[in-house]
Image (cartoon, rainbow, N blue to C red):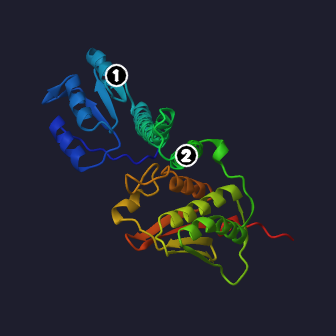
Amino acid sequence: MNNIDIQVQWSPSLSSALENLATETFDIVVTDLGLPESRGIESFLKLHARYPRVPVIVLSGLSDETLAIQAVRSGAQDYLVKGAIDSASLLKAIRYSIERQRLLTELESKLEEIKKLERERKSVLSMFAHDIKNAIIPSTWVLKRFLSGKTRDLKDDLLLIDDSLKTAEELLTGFIEFSRFETKGYLPVKGDFDVKTAVLKQIEGIKLEAVQKDISVEYFFPAEPLPVILADERMIQRVIANLLQNAVKYNKPGGTVNVAVKVSETEILFEVRDTGIGIPDKHIPFIFDAFYRVSPDQKGSGLGLVIARTILDAHDGKIWVESEAGKGSTFSFTLPRSSLVPPEF
């Protein structure tokens, strides 16, 4: 058969065939509809119900061709009429049946993936609606109290409204960016990216908030000049800013944030270490999932880290966290040295 190595195992009955399928892997099954212990389409249906992923070719006589067609409609890959086939047509049917089953399995897998994504999408939308509602409700109560003339402290009420609307704005901004993940608009536009300048800029931007919480921000750069790489400046700045904001936000008064940049032959490593509340071990596997929060009362969109991971994926980088509850966390990410700006000659 065109020099193709085909190994055949014969089973005298349906039960023995099922036993063989349970212990060995077969590329295809060719079965008669008339077996000693099972006759007609039931022979195929029993086999197919037990092993739906194994392609089956049904052998039929002229008198039971209608049953063979019924078997195909029930999931068999093909049927062949006994006495009207030769080795070439049998080999062709086997090849086509195996390929059709492979494509069918692949299609089913993709459909399951689509269903999973749809479930996740609905879950994300539900969580987002819940978060927006929770962010807006306090300001709604305050405004109703104000309109009814029952305001006791106008400044405190206005501060509450301001805080509520800022939270809603953060949620909306994060969700809009999150929604761009699968669009061309989220692809990085790479250019010359000065690592040291970017880090210092974000440290300067977080200093006021850090001072207000009595948190010191320290940084370390290697003695040798840091390289300029090809990266989307806006995106990487977003990652650095997010990690610094979290390091200050979840730190303790009198705590420290340490930022370090290290260079190896293959990559640039960024580390943001804090002395804050840390993350319990059970939460770490989910910390980069959309809308995930370590505690129910935690503020924020829950999208910052998943956005950071998506940005770094687009740059062929990686991000991870090491943490100990009560002692602090270290968020690290890398950018490959392969993205270095080519030297000029």
Q: Which of 319 and 89 is in front in this view?
A: 319
In the shown orientation, is residue 176 left or right of residue 18?
Answer: right
Q: What residue type is labelled 2?
A: Leu
Q: Residue 140: which disc?
A: none
**Residue 234's image quarter?**
bottom right
Check the image and report above or below for 178 versus 244. Answer: above
Please identify the residue farthest to the right as the structure is shown: 345
Whether residue 232 can be seen here:
no
Check the image and report above or below for 23 versus 196. Answer: above
Q: How crowded is mark 1: few (under 14 residues within 10 Å), some or many (20 or more)?
A: few
Q: Which amino acid does label 1 sit on?
A: Arg
**Residue 81's image quarter?**
top left
Check the image and report above or below for 65 versus 141. Answer: above
Q: x%, y% of residue 68?
A: 30, 21
Residue highlighted by disc 1: 73
Q: x%, y% of residue 163?
A: 53, 49
Residue highlighted by disc 2: 158
In the shown orientation, is residue 145 left or right of residue 71?
Answer: right
For the point 46% across and 42% down, the residue is 138
Q: x%, y% of residue 290?
A: 47, 49
